[in-house]
Image (cartoon, rainbow, N blue to C red):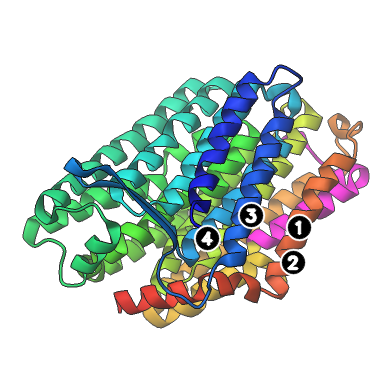
């Protein structure tokens, strides 16, 4: 299977060229065709992946720029595979969610470039290559918000770019310092140095701080989160789904792949402070969501809340919350997009009411996504949250107890939203709403069934990353 990872990275780039040059029709059918090819490659990786092996698999290594220690080095472990599969699921979901009228060829081509960057980020094992893909995702995301975004898109795109760019500069400077001390950008080699202390003294803390800031912005972790609500609110619905479903996972993945293996001693020293930041994201974000009337902005703040759980999960060494949040958050943004399409771009809670009388199927399926985000037993959200609290309680009982407050506030936010949207008299502006259309059912039903499948029988998901997580726990223990 040598070359399969390279194929999965470059297929979306070829698709972007095909979308731009295809002389007939719109760009979405071509983009979806290349998504199918990418998904087939991802499934081939999964089928041939040895879940009992702890190290990297499907490794491809080629000389690139020896003078600066840069190699084309890619490979996957259980966590990488999980995120590759998530990307293969969310991107076509976002394409189908984007109204055809608002999706041009340039839009789909830009999305495919971002998909390639995501695959590269989750598989690269040399920092120079990893950083190239990591930054490669910044430009498409910026353009998608700035060109195809809604009101205040210039401000939101600029804010997104500045936050992410400055964080990336800090991370790059940190790794240049590490390279000058150790002479390598190989992540596995640096992780082996990290066991006994990668750097010493103030230099170690400066390098740790640079990498931490760069990743915290990308997650985003409190208090580096302020770019996110504006970006998610302004971005087209398909882009919002990718931002919350996959792009935010790059930061969480970076914590696992870079910060924890390279600086285990520093993590242990300031662990309580990092836990405090995660708890702030978990508790304060739903309180901010409670104050929102705009549905996209409300879900954006709740996404910060769930990413806080993902960061708490790092201390529990649990990977499933990353995958579960990606599916659930993207689905919630999809439903907000459906309401926008039916109401003429309105999305305030006050613009709707009594939808259960007019669109019972839409309300029912949307309720499932909300209950999944709440962590209702039987759905995928419960599995992730149960593992988080089970693992983190043994390590930090006091912080975990405070984090439960976030669950309570999130429940209040969703119950209020359901009451305002679905119950009461039918709003006059909603009297002409159609229920779920055939194409919309084709998108919603499989994703919802996946939520139930993970919630009822999650072992098929656990088998992907159990060995990798156990290996990480040994390294950090």
175 to the left or right of 7: left
- Can you identify the residue that label 4 sits on? 81
Point out which mark residue 448 bears. Answer: 1
- Dot 4 falls on a residue whose secondary structure is helix
Mark before the other along the chain sequence, 4 or 2: 4
Are there few (<14), some (14-19), or many (20+) residues within 10 Å of tag 3?
Answer: many
Q: Nearer the viewer, mark 4 or mark 2?
A: 4
Magenta stretch, residue numbers: 349-373
- Nearest the eye: 110 or 48: 48
Question: Residue at point 26% right, 66% down?
Answer: 267
Residue 259 is inside the magenta segment: no
Mark before the other along the chain sequence, 4 or 1: 4
Point out which mark residue 452 bears. Answer: 2
- Can you identify the residue that label 3 sits on? 327
Find out whether the residues at labels 3 and 2 contact each other: C-beta distance under 8 Å.
no
- Dot 2 falls on a residue whose secondary structure is helix
Q: Residue furthest top?
A: 23
- Dot 1 falls on a residue whose secondary structure is helix
Q: At which x and y percent is residue 319?
A: 50, 67
Disc 4 to disc 2, how far (Cα)?
21 Å
Question: Residue at point 13% right, 58% down?
Answer: 204
């Amino acid at each position: 299977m040598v070359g399969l990872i390279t194929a999965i990275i470059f297929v979306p780039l070829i698709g972007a060229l095909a979308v731009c040059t295809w002389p007939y029709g719109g760009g979405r059918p071509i983009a979806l065709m290349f998504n199918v090819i990418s998904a087939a490659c991802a499934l081939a990786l999964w089928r041939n992946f040895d879940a009992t092996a702890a190290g990297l698999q499907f490794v491809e290594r080629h000389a690139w720029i020896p003078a600066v220690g840069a190699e084309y080095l890619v490979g996957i472990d259980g966590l990488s595979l999980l995120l590759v599969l998530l990307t293969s699921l969310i991107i076509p979901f976002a394409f189908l969610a984007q109204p055809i009228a608002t999706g041009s060829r340039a839009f789909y081509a830009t999305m495919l470039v971002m998909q390639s960057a995501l695959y590269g980020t989750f598989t690269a094992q040399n920092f120079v290559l990893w950083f190239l893909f990591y930054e490669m995702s910044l430009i498409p995301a910026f353009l998608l918000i700035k060109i195809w975004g809604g009101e205040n898109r210039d401000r939101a795109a600029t804010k997104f770019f500045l936050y992410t760019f400055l964080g990336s500069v800090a991370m790059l400077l940190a790794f240049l310092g590490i390279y000058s001390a150790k002479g390598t950008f190989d992540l596995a080699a640096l992780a082996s140095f990290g066991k006994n202390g990668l750097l010493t003294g103030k230099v170690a803390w400066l390098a740790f701080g640079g990498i931490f800031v760069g990743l915290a912005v990308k997650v985003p972790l409190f208090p580096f989160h302020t770019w996110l609500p504006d970006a998610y609110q302004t971005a087209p619905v398909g882009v919002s789904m990718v931002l919350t479903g996959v792009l935010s996972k790059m930061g969480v993945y970076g914590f696992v792949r870079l910060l924890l293996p390279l600086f285990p001693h520093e993590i242990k020293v300031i662990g309580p402070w990092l836990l405090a930041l995660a708890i702030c994201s978990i508790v304060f974000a739903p309180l901010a969501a409670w104050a929102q009337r705009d549905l996209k902005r409300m879900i954006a703040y709740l996404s910060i809340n769930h990413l806080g759980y993902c960061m708490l999960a790092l201390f529990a060494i649990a990977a499933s919350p990353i995958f579960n949040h990606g599916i659930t958050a993207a689905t919630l943004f999809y439903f907000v997009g459906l309401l926008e399409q039916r109401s003429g771009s309105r999305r305030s809670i006050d613009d709707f009411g009594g939808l259960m009388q007019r669109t019972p199927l839409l309300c029912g399926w949307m309720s499932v996504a909300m209950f999944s985000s709440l962590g209702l037993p039987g759905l995928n959200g419960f599995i992730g949250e149960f593992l988080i609290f089970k693992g983190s309680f043994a390590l930090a009982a006091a912080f975990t107890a405070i984090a439960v407050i976030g669950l309570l506030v999130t429940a209040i936010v969703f119950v209020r939203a359901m009451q305002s949207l679905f119950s009461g008299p039918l709003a006059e502006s909603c009297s002409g709403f159609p229920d779920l259309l055939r194409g919309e059912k084709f998108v919603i039903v499989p994703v919802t069934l996946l939520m139930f499948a993970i919630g009822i029988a999650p072992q098929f998901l656990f088998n992907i990353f159990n060995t990798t997580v156990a290996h990480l726990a040994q390294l950090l223990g």
